[in-house]
Amino acid sequence: MRVKYVFNEVLVGLWRNVTMTVAMIITMSVSLTMLGASALLYMQVNQMKDYYYGEIQVSIFLREDVTDAQRTAINQAIDSNPLVLNKTYETREQAYQKFLVLWRDSPDFIKSVGPDSLPESFRVKLKDPEKYKQFADQMQGMAGIQDIVDQRELLNKVFDIFNSIQVMALVVAGVMALAALLLVGNTIQVAAYSKRREVAVMKLVGASNWFIQSPFVLEAVVAGLVGSVLGFVALFVGKVVLLDGRLQALTNVLTPIPNGNVWLMLPLLAGVGAVVSAVTAWVTLRFYLRV
Amino acid sequence: MIQLESVTKTYPKASRPSLDNVSVGIEKGEFVFFIGPSGSGKSTIIKLLLHEVAPSTGKVVVNAKDVTSLRSWKIPHFRRSIGCVFQDFRLLPNRTAYENVAFALEVIGKTKAVARRVVPEVLELVGLGGKEHRYPHELSGGEQQRVAVARAFVNRPLILLADEPTGNLDPDTSVEIMRLLDRINRTGTTVVMVTHDSNIVNQMRRRVIEIESGRIVRDQARGVYG
């Protein structure tokens, strides 16, 4: 009977103030969509880091006038370096062949570059890509080296962009969450006011606090859950329409987002939505339903 | 049953205390009037006994429980042993007489079956047999107060507090309500009533405690309004 009573109170409460309920659900779902997007992006960036960092090489370009002795010395220095996982040597000819393949769509550009204009190089894979700086410092002084380039630096610029998108999504999520919280607080206040007579009688005859408060808290939780489901649907639709559809070209670079990750957002958003609204409602009630 | 020990209550921002070093004891089964002019501190006593407010200093003991040191989450359970009636009835307008009384049972966890058994009984006791399904606006003031008394008494509390229960009623109806409270008192329930209705106090000839400016100025076993 009490479960039925509480459930009924929740439905009546949500319906009584339906415009506010809708506003609450919308802000909640937008906020949670942003939170979900930012979480997905975070997982995505980590996944991409794992993927690309595994492929990363440090290129040591040799000077045009490098001598055989210098080349051998560099070769030995790389082989004896404990940071190195493996290395390959690329001749000028090989570099030119790669260049031809890479730029096959721009014959004019190819024409302007002769087979001799590309430097020979060692392509070094490190055991830990993060230790690039240490490795570069050790190699830097050697004669015959023109330049040491870490691909990671290039990638990091890309990741920086993702990170700032993620931060932006988080900021929007935070601002919307604040609005959602204020709406939850307000809805609970209105609900508590419209039921003030019942609440007064309940307090008078000694109904327990949880019994008085639970319909209000559950009201907020239900709105939070509905908001999180809508937010999840928005994420899923966004993923299918944007990434799998229009921006598919981008996904080739980005590494695809697994559907499992998107599904993972449902419990995350539902949990955050429910807990945040419950806590807000409860805190509001502490102020408006003093014993 | 009820013990106030040197109780002082000063509300925030008030210049003088509502109750000033009040000590009084009430035995089980007593019928006690608190009388005095408006603002004398009578209603503060009711609030203290319900633990709606806490005393500034001193001790309040109800049912052998020190209310002052009661943890806040235990207050609801404590209140179940006290029934309370007010001048303005405090009924729920969208519920019938039956539902008003049943509500008080259901919100403390009693089943509908218990309500079906107990509520008609208590409505009969207060003299509302046959009017169970009327809404408050379909009842007279006296009848509404009977519903309120039924709600306060349905749990068989040890104490019944009444804060000016006849304040909104005409003299004849007031007498009927007093008969009802008297009947409840005879079941062994301690009744504490705050009033400034001199006729009623004079008719009942029960213990009278007069309060003025927060102090007890008279405590008389079979008193009159004075």
Image: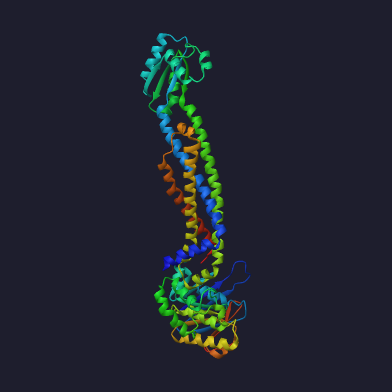
Asked if one can make out residue A209 in the rendered structure from this viewpoint, the answer is no
Residue A202 point in image, percent of width and height:
49, 70
Using the image as rendered, state which of residue A287 and residue B100 is in the foreground.
B100
Q: In which quarter of the image is the N terminus of chain B?
A: bottom left
Q: Does residue A23 lie above or below B96 as drawn?
A: above
- Residue that extends furthest to the right in the rendered view of this protein: B15
Looking at the image, residue A110 sits to the left or right of residue B39; the answer is left
Identify whether B107 is placed above or below A114: below
Q: Is residue B207 above or below residue A208?
A: below
Residue sitting at 53 percent across and 62 percent down? A15
Could you say which is closer to the camera, residue B106 or residue B202? Answer: B106
On the image, the x and y values in percent for residue B142 come to 55, 84
Quadrant containing the C terminus of chain B in the rendered view:
bottom right
The residue positioned 60% from the left and 66% from the top of the image is B12
Q: Quadrant of residue B215?
A: bottom right
Residue at point 54%, 52% (across, down): A26
Q: Which of the pair B219/A282 is nearer the observer?
A: A282
How many marks on residues? 0
Relative image position of residue A145 (x, y in whole percent): 46, 15
- In the image, residue A31 sits, relative to residue A187, either above or below, namely above
**Image spot of residue A165 (x, y percent):** 53, 38
Q: Please state if A96 lies on the left or on the right of B198 as rendered.
A: left
Horizontal side of B94 relative to B188 (left or right) equals: right
Q: Is residue A241 visible?
A: yes
**Residue B168, image quadrant:** bottom right
- Residue at (53% x, 49% y) in the render: A177
